[in-house]
Image: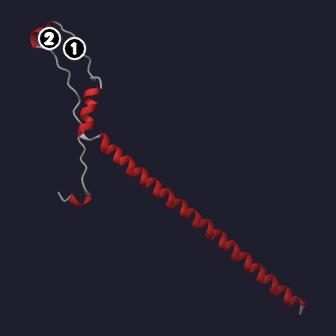
Amino acid sequence: MFFRFAAGLILVVIVSMVGIDLEKQTLEMRRAVSGQYFQKDLLLEMHAHLRLEIQTLTAPSQLAKIDHTMPPLITPHRPSIDSERWGPATPSLPPLPLLRWQHPARSSN
């Protein structure tokens, strides 16, 4: 009689310990998933912020300001015999970058 009671009690304790372990694993996985969702939200927000910053920096008005405020990449040409014959050399500025942004719904080319 005592043996049956002890075996039943041990069985109940073992089942409850397995249940507690499963609950801990489930809670740990939920925390990991929640952290991943939080990280995903932060990355999406950072992506949107950086994309907005790119659009504002590459706006034609901003690029025109940058072109006028930046020193030229080519040093001014010193007058020489060739410049008298061919005319003064004009430093060529690099062209404005062309961004080809396309809206996904409108890209039916």
Q: Quadrant of residue 99?
A: top left
At horizontal 61% and vertical 70% (from top left) the residue drawn is 26
**Display colour scheme:** secondary structure
Q: What residue would you read off at disc 2?
A: 83
The reply to whether dot 2 and dot 1 touch (C-beta < 8 Å) is yes
Measure the alpha-carbon separation of dots 2 and 1: 9 Å
When the figure is inspected, residue 31 is found, relative to residue 81, above or below; the finding is below
Q: Position of residue 69 (x, y in %)?
A: 29, 27
Residue extending farthest to the left is 85
- Identify residue type, mark 1: His
Numbered disc total: 2
When the figure is inspected, residue 108 is found, relative to residue 17, above or below; the finding is above
At horizontal 55% and vertical 60% (from top left) the residue drawn is 35
Residue extending farthest to the bottom is 1
Please name whichever residue, 18 or 66, is drawn nearer the observer in this view of the structure: 66
For mark 2, does the 10 Å Cα neighbourhood hold few (<14), some (14 to 19), or many (20 or more) residues? Answer: few
Q: Secondary structure at mark 1?
A: loop
At horizontal 78% and vertical 80% (from top left) the residue drawn is 13
- Identify residue type, mark 2: Ser
Q: What residue would you read off at disc 1?
A: 77
Q: Secondary structure at mark 2?
A: helix
Q: Position of residue 43 (x, y in %)?
A: 45, 53
Q: Quadrant of residue 88?
A: top left
Please name whichever residue, 94 or 71, is drawn nearer the observer in this view of the structure: 71
**Looking at the image, is mark 2 or mark 1 earlier in the sequence?**
1
